[in-house]
Amino acid sequence: MKNVTDSFVSLGHWPSAGSFGFNTDILATNPINLSIVLGVLIFFGKGVLSDLLDNRKQRILDTIRNSEELREGAIEQLEKARDRLRKVEIEADQFRMNGYSEIEREKLNLINSTYKTLEQLENYKNETIHFEQQRTINQVRQQVFQQALQGALGTLNSCLTNELHLRTINANLGMFGAIKEITD
């Protein structure tokens, strides 16, 4: 604390560099000079200060007016949003009620279509099995027929003479031609 006091005391003892200097001793300063300086500051600063205060007041009023307009807009939007929410809730309830019955209908339709599809698949399976059985039976018949024919030809070849052999071949070719015409 003593250092602070010493610094103020030392300011009062600055050597003057002419006619200008600081006098830090409040009791020694001239009250008239102070009142003149204060009067000049008040006189000239009053206009500037009042302009600053008026500008600040106007900005505050504009801000309050804008805030009120925004608040009114927000209240309108809130009411609209509440109305939309009520409508959506009503629609959601209707969809929910309709949805449950629709789900049940769709469930029954799906079950019925699944049964129909399974029945069709069973029919296709049975038809495919029957077709494959017939095809296999025909293949076995052809193989048996070919083997019997080869066996008969082998027997005929070993027993027949050339002339008899040629007549038998011609007769068999005629039979094969007739069989081929029947199958085509």
Image: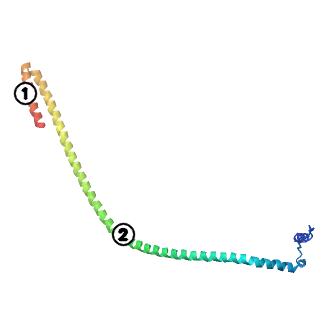
Residue at image position (8%, 31%) is: 175
- Left-right relation of 72 to 86: right
Residue 39 in which image quadrant: bottom right
Q: Which mark is residue 101?
A: none
Measure the C-alpha gap from mark 1 to mark 2.
84 Å
Which is more toward the observer, 101 or 142?
101
Quadrant holding the N terminus: bottom right
| Colour convention of the picture | rainbow
Q: Quick one: SS at disc 2?
A: helix
Q: Is residue 39 above or below residue 97?
A: below
The disc label shown at residue 95, or none: 2
Who is closer to the viewer here, 57 or 172? 57
Residue 26 appears left or right of 133: right
Q: Secondary structure at mark 1?
A: helix
First in sequence: mark 1 vs mark 2:
2
Which amino acid type is shown beneath numbered disc 2? Phe
From the image, state whether disc 1 or disc 2 is nearer to you. 2
The residue shown at (20%, 48%) is 127
Q: Measuring from the top left, give residue 72's x and y in whole percent.
A: 52, 77
Q: Nearer the viewer, residue 114 or 184?
A: 184
Can you give x and y, in whole percent of width and height, for residue 121 in the image? 25, 51
User: How many numbered callouts?
Assistant: 2
In the picture, the quarter occupied by the C terminus is: top left
Q: Kindly identify which residue carries mark 1.
A: 171
